[in-house]
Amino acid sequence: MDNRINEIRKIIRALRVSMREAEAIMHEQINRDEDCTFVAEEVMKMRTVMSGLVQERAALGDTDPIVVASLFVPRRRPAPPRIGVEKRRLVPPREVARA
């Protein structure tokens, strides 16, 4: 039983990472106004598999949390801090006096 629990835990870890990567790809496609149907269907299939694995794991009596180190996929690098730059204020244009 311990071997099956360890196998399930490994599969769940890998599936979580794959799901996060697929979701990031899907969000990028949405932002570019592209069709994301295929990726969305794959994520739904992964969730179905995940649900079955979680049920099997619970039936075997495993209640320990599964930690995934690379769960968060960064979208882009943060902008570097702007030191010494003041915000510009928009000043309405002055009316030109006609002579």
Image: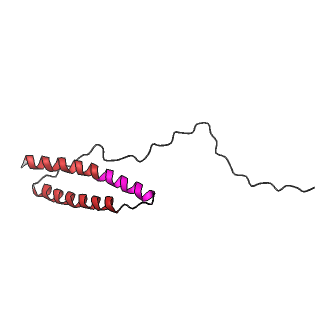
- Which secondary structure class fits the magenta region best? helix
**Number of marks in the rendered image:** 0
- Residue at x-position 29% and y-position 53%: 19
Report the side of 84 relative to 81 (left or right): right
Direction left: furthest residue: 1
Which of the pair 97/63 is nearer the observer? 97
Residue 22 belongs to the span the image colors magenta: yes
First to last magenta residue range: 19-33
**In the picture, which quadrant includes the C terminus?**
bottom right
Report the side of 72 relative to 1 (left or right): right
Direction right: furthest residue: 99
Residue 58 belongs to the span the image colors magenta: no
Report the side of 72 relative to 61 (left or right): right
- Residue at x-position 16% and y-position 52%: 63
Question: How far across and how far down the image is residue 43, in percent?
Answer: 28, 58
- Residue at x-position 32% and y-position 58%: 39
Which coloring applies here? Answer: secondary structure
Q: Is residue 96 above or below residue 81?
A: below
**Residue 95 lies in what quarter of the image?**
bottom right
Question: How far across and how far down the image is residue 15, in percent?
Answer: 24, 51
Question: How far across and how far down the image is residue 82, in percent?
Answer: 57, 39
Question: How far across and how far down the image is residue 14, in percent?
Answer: 23, 48
